Image: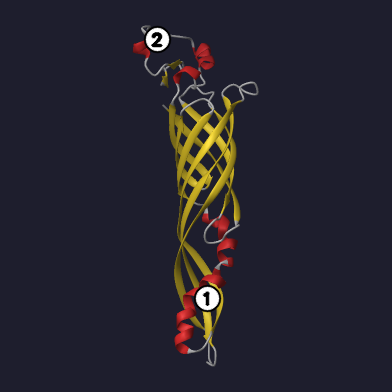
């Protein structure tokens, strides 16, 4: 499926219909798109999303009401600085525990800085869509739920002083690989009233950590475009 040079929509298989594709004026073409036609499902879409996270996105439209999407990309790590800093004490305790046991002494660690080496995610979600063309031509509202996997590599730097020692503090660092997952719920809208086979969308979702920090919640969202075929 695509739009013609004048912007008019054509069927995925015009040849099988037994009719030639009519030529229409530019004004008429605008009316013939949006791209989704009830008789032409399933559709597919591939594109990108900007926000938290930045992702490549694929969407399958088996029917007008149901769709399935997969997003993969990089989280907006800067939005999580406060959260990642708050993880320091727990991660530092685990990282230095064996040293404390061997030495028989405890170290006093003070956070200095952290760096997000990588922060990747993968998400799969099922969506239910409502036709909102009465509000605006080409508009669909949707909501749904899914599952998100996240893998984050964090490098922490700190100052420490061992109990019973004298002199200036020492400097240290450690790196942690933090893998987690959890459910997401989301809502958004998709708009496809264009002269090209593309759709634009805006969505917001809430992620809940179910593994390493159970109960932690984070709102996410973004805007994006998909090429529909």
Q: Quadrant of the C terminus?
A: top left
Residue 211 pos. (x, y %): 52, 58
Residue 5 pos. (x, y %): 41, 17
Gap between marks 2 and 1 measured at Cα: 70 Å
Residue 21 disc label: 2
Above or below residue 170? Residue 27 is above
Above or below residue 77? Residue 146 is above
Farthest right residue? 135
Residue at (47%, 52%) from the top-left corner?
149
Above or below residue 84? Residue 42 is above
Q: Residues within 10 Å of mark 1 (few under 14, many from 20)?
A: few
Residue 55 pos. (x, y %): 46, 44
Q: Residues within 10 Å of mark 2 (few under 14, many from 20)?
A: some
Q: Does the residue at mark 2 contact the one at mark 1 (Cβ under 8 Å)?
A: no
Above or below residue 4? Residue 108 is below
Residue 202 disc label: none
For label 1, the residue is 93
State the image quarter where residue 217 is shown: bottom right
């Amino acid at each position: 499926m695509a739009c013609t040079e004048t912007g008019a929509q054509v069927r995925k298989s015009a040849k099988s219909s037994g009719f030639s594709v009519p030529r229409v004026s530019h004004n008429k073409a605008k009316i013939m798109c949006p791209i989704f036609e009830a008789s032409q499902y399933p559709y597919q879409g591939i594109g990108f999303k900007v926000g938290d996270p930045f992702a490549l996105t694929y969407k399958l439209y088996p029917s007008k009401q149901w769709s399935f999407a997969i997003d993969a990309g990089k989280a907006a790590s800067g939005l999580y600085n406060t959260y990642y800093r708050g993880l320091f004490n727990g991660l530092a305790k685990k990282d230095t525990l064996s040293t404390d046991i061997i030495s028989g002494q405890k170290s006093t660690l003070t956070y200095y800085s952290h760096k997000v080496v990588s922060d990747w995610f993968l998400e799969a979600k099922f969506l239910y869509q409502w036709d909102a063309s009465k509000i605006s031509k080409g508009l669909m509202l949707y909501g749904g739920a899914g599952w998100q996997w996240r893998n984050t590599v964090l490098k922490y730097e700190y100052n420490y002083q061992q109990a019973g020692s004298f002199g200036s503090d020492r400097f240290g660092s450690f790196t942690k690989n933090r893998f987690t997952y959890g459910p997401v719920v989301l809502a958004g809208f998709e708009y496809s009233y264009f002269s090209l086979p593309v759709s634009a969308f805006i969505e917001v979702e809430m992620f809940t950590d179910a593994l390493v920090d159970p109960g932690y919640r984070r709102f996410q969202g973004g805007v994006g475009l998909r090429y529909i075929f």
